Amino acid sequence: MGRATSCSSSSIESSTELRKDLSTDLRLGLSISSSSQHDNSSFSRIRDQPSDWPPIKPLLRKALEAEENESNSATFFVKVYMEGIPIGRKLDLLAHDGYHDLITTLDHMFNTSILWSDVDGSYSDQKYHVLTYEDKEGDWMMVGDVPWEMFLSTVRRLKITRA
């Protein structure tokens, strides 16, 4: 019996030694200060730094930065619908200098020829379309009937219809 007690006492001693050896220091060397002012400033510094995640190529990064800078400029988007095409397209009117520039853009966008008040009356067998716009009152008007600045102040959307 004495042997059993000595065995049990040695097993108790070895288990306490194991507990001492298995204790882990979880502090990880990080110091947590009690002042919340320090924590807030460090978090705001981290948050204000540009993130490098996800990793993108420098060329794409420059393009994205240029796009962000351009987004600060003024824009005025309207929807343009064409008869026979179920989906409308957005167009920035402030990116155009006048009616001629707008008509040229729409000609290329919809691959058609658009008639308006500045075009001569010489028509061939080619299919033509007419550009109209809806004003603030809900009336449909011909594009080119009013000065460009007045057009920009009243237009809500554009519609290209067959002539």
Image (cartoon, rainbow, N blue to C red):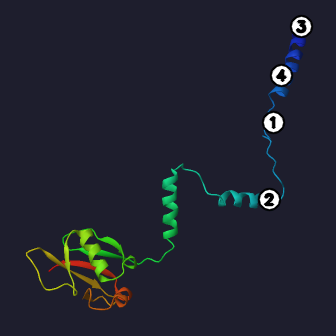
Which tag, 2 or 1, sits closer to the chain's start? 1
Mark 4–mark 3 CB contact (< 8 Å): no
Residue 3: assigned label? 3
Work out whether mark 1 precedes mark 3 in sequence or the reverse, and give the earlier one.
3
Pointer 4: residues within 10 angstroms few (<14), some, or many (20+)? few
Which residue lies under the disc numbered 2? 38
Residue type highlighted by circle 3:
Arg
Q: Residue at x 81, y 31 (%)?
A: 23
- Residue drawn at point x = 30 percent, y = 83 percent: 99
Residue 68 coordinates in the image, percent (x, y) = 51, 66
Residue 37, x across and y down, in percent: 80, 62
| Mark positioned earlier in the residue sequence (2 or 3) | 3
CA gap between label 4 and label 1 equals 19 Å
- Assign the N terminus to one quadrant of the image: top right
Residue picked out by circle 1: 25
Which marked residue is nearer to the observer: mark 4 or mark 2? 2
* Closest to the observer, 36 or 9: 36
Give the number of the mark in front: 2 or 3.
2
Q: Is residue 145 above or below residue 114?
A: below
CA separation, marks 2 and 1? 25 Å
Badge number at residue 15: 4
Q: Earlier in the sequence, mark 4 or mark 3?
A: 3
Label whose residue precedes the other's in the sequence (4 or 1): 4
Q: Nearer the viewer's eye, disc 1 or disc 3?
A: 1
Crowd class of label 2 (few under 14; some 14 to 19; many from 20; radius 10 Å): few
Please tell me how crowded label 3 is: few (under 14), some (14-19), or many (20+) other residues with Cα within 10 Å. few
Residue type pointed to by label 2 = His
User: Helix, strand or loop at disc 3?
Assistant: helix
Q: Are marks 2 and 1 in contact (CB under 8 Å)?
A: no
